[in-house]
Amino acid sequence: MSNLIIFATSSSGLGALGVSGSAFIIQLITFILGYLVLRKYAFGPIIKALNERRKLIDEGVKLGDQMREKNQKLEEQIKHDLAQARVKADQIISDAEINAKELVLKAENEAQTKASSIIEEAARKTEQDMKRAKRQLESEIISLITEVSEALAQDKIDSKKDLDLINRYIREQEKV
């Protein structure tokens, strides 16, 4: 201690700079006590709060990474689902086009069948009308021939001769 006193009272060295040894020791003790108090009451809670904050930040970063990974997976799943939906939509459109073509073909076939039956019915009706007209015409021709024959012969020919004349006339007309 005598050295300290000499150190503090000497006018050379640190004493010449205005540093007092006793003031230095008091400041050193105050610093150590302040450090110990801060360490016990302030540094622990501050370090604990910093560690908790660091953990929270690390968890946030990890959560952010997980969210990015999930987001990427979700985007990939969405792309995959959209691709599948496009394939299904294309298949549905293709099936609809095929069904539409089949319906059109079926309708065309039904129309063709109906048209054919209408044509056949018309042909049958025309044939019946022609037969009826032919019979009517034959009847009128027979009547005209009979009248002409009577007028020429001035006498009615018997029915057998009349029929023979009519048949011969019809055969000649069919050849023409």
Image: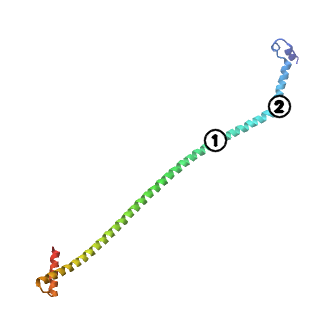
Q: Which residue is mark 1?
A: 64
Residue 6 as seen in the image, left or right of residue 136? right
Q: Residue 121: which numbered mark, if any?
A: none
Q: Decide which of 153, 42 is in the foreground and name it.
A: 153
Answer few, some or many: residues within 10 Å of disc 1's Cα (few below 14, many 20 plus, some between 14 and 19): few
**x and y, in percent, of residue 40 in the image:** 81, 33
User: Label 2, label 1: how many angstroms apart (C-alpha)?
Assistant: 39 Å
Using the image, determine if residue 119 lies above or below residue 6: below
Q: Residue at x 27, y 72 (%)?
A: 126
**x and y, in percent, of residue 90 in the image:** 46, 53
Quadrant hosting residue 37? top right
Residue found farthest to the bottom: 158
Q: Earlier in the sequence, mark 2 or mark 1?
A: 2
Answer few, some or many: residues within 10 Å of disc 2's Cα (few below 14, many 20 plus, some between 14 and 19): few
**x and y, in percent, of residue 172 in the image:** 14, 77
Type of amino acid at the residue the image marks with label 2 = Val
Q: Which residue is mark 2?
A: 37
**x and y, in percent, of residue 161 in the image:** 14, 86
Q: Residue at x 16, y 76 (%)?
A: 173
